[in-house]
Image (tube, rainbow, N blue to C red):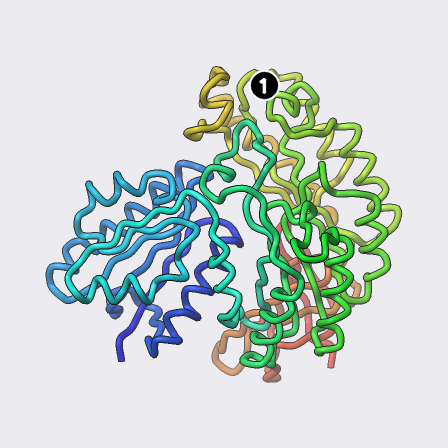
Amino acid sequence: MKTFFIKVFGCQMNEYDSLKVKSILESLNLKEVKDPYQADIILVDTCTVREKPENKALSFLGQFRKLKKEKNLILGIFGCVPQRIGKKIYEEMPYVDIVIGTFNYYLLPYYLEKVKKGKRVFEIWNNYKEEENKVSFYPSPPKGPISYITIQIGCNRFCSYCIVPFVRGRERSKPISLILKEIDKTLEKYPFIKEIQLLGQNIDFYKCPETKISFENALENISNYVLKKGIKRVRFVTSHPAGFSKKLIDTLYNLKEIVMPYVHLPPQSGSNKILKLMKRGYTKEEYLEKVFYLKEKIKDVSISGDFIVGFPGETEKDFEETLSLVEKVRYDQGFVFAYNPRPYTYAATFLKDNVFKEEKINRLQVLNSLISKIGYEKNKAFVGKETPVLITKIEKQDQKYLYEGRNPQNKIVIFESEKKIDFDIYKVKIKEAYPYYLKGVLNV
């Protein structure tokens, strides 16, 4: 049996795409292996939101150039990087057999046949075609007991720093009927799934092309549907603050038995001046109003966010406003990035990258330290309490098992036990807290 290996760089959307590719390849009776050097087909799923993961992806692919000469190996790259520089990859990396973008990976069976006939493939589409939805007819392979389901793709926001609209296309939403069919196919093949995670570039801008219902209604329909199917948890990412409404918060409150109390709501900056330069479409005050309403309605909610430091024009005062925002919101978790210009974007074209690299690194470290400190303080509040944990990882260690999972607030929980348990939800009493995870004991 022929084998394949997929390396993923990037966000959960990339994870979903790669899982779909896995499903497509398995439908061809190909087998996944964990070691790329044992594979007959190596595919790299790529991210171009920042320069570092882009370079990593190309470097990873390049290390198999010599191996390709020694065996009949097929090398391929797909996703956001070839969507941006596919022609350059095709011309400068002649050992790569398949170069495709973000819209057409569902055609991999056809492309593999072409490669078997001695041809290289270079096919980058510049826009969405209705056939893209065909990937929904492949069950979504889970990661442990969690299945990702994409319901919204692309972006119309055009934030001044972001390349996503150029490599993922305009906003488009899957019909509710197709989402439910994908869920049915997935649960039919993987009945052990306990959690569904709904994905979208800006998921709160979802609008069903058939019924025209908004994300609030879609979330309610999907949650009630999977609850009847035995699913115990629903999560969603990523929310855009401009689309995150009080109506959605009320919906989360009404669905609190199935939708977990965790929201990823990226502010990017706490300075109104910088938010305007970023073209984010909201002010700091509007953002805080929504956060405070969310916390008022859902008392145990945890909030995470993304932040960019060193954006063009960001002064020390602007950065201090971001620190102030973090103090007010008290994020459970945060992801901080130093600004670097991305091709095609407004900021790269029209704004001067005038914050020194050393200052960017310093601000990144200061902000990370503050977020870590607050996260640690919030984690300590769990010590001595019991929390339900969905097991996502199991390792055998001597006479014990090491378990890792997530509680409703999406916090990592680790514990050991001599008892063998499955990928399900168990009560764990928290004994220790750390900045990025909790440690406890199994309550049986």
Q: Is 110 rendered above or below residue 90?
A: below
Residue 236: image quadrant is: bottom right
Quadrant in the picture for the N terminus:
bottom left
Locate residue 72, reporting x and y percent: 15, 66
Q: Is 325 rendered above or below residue 81?
A: above
Amino acid at the residue labelled 1 = Glu
Q: Is 381 positioned to the left or the right of 350 in the image?
A: right
Locate residue 389, reporting x and y percent: 69, 69
The residue lying at 47 percent from left, 52 percent from top is 129
For this rendering, which residue is in front, 271 or 174? 174
Quadrant in the picture for the C terminus:
bottom right
Dot 1 surroundings within 10 Å: few (below 14), some, or many (20 or more)? Answer: some
Q: Residue furthest right?
A: 296
For this rendering, which residue is in front, 98 or 195? 98
Residue 195: image quadrant is: bottom right
For this rendering, which residue is in front, 51 or 173? 173
The residue lying at 52 percent from left, 53 percent from top is 13
Q: Which residue is mark 1?
A: 314
Locate residue 256, reporting x and y percent: 82, 61
Q: Is 351 positioned to the left or the right of 96 in the image?
A: right
Q: Residue furthest left?
A: 70
For mark 1, give the secondary structure: loop
Number of numbered discs visible in the structure rendering:
1
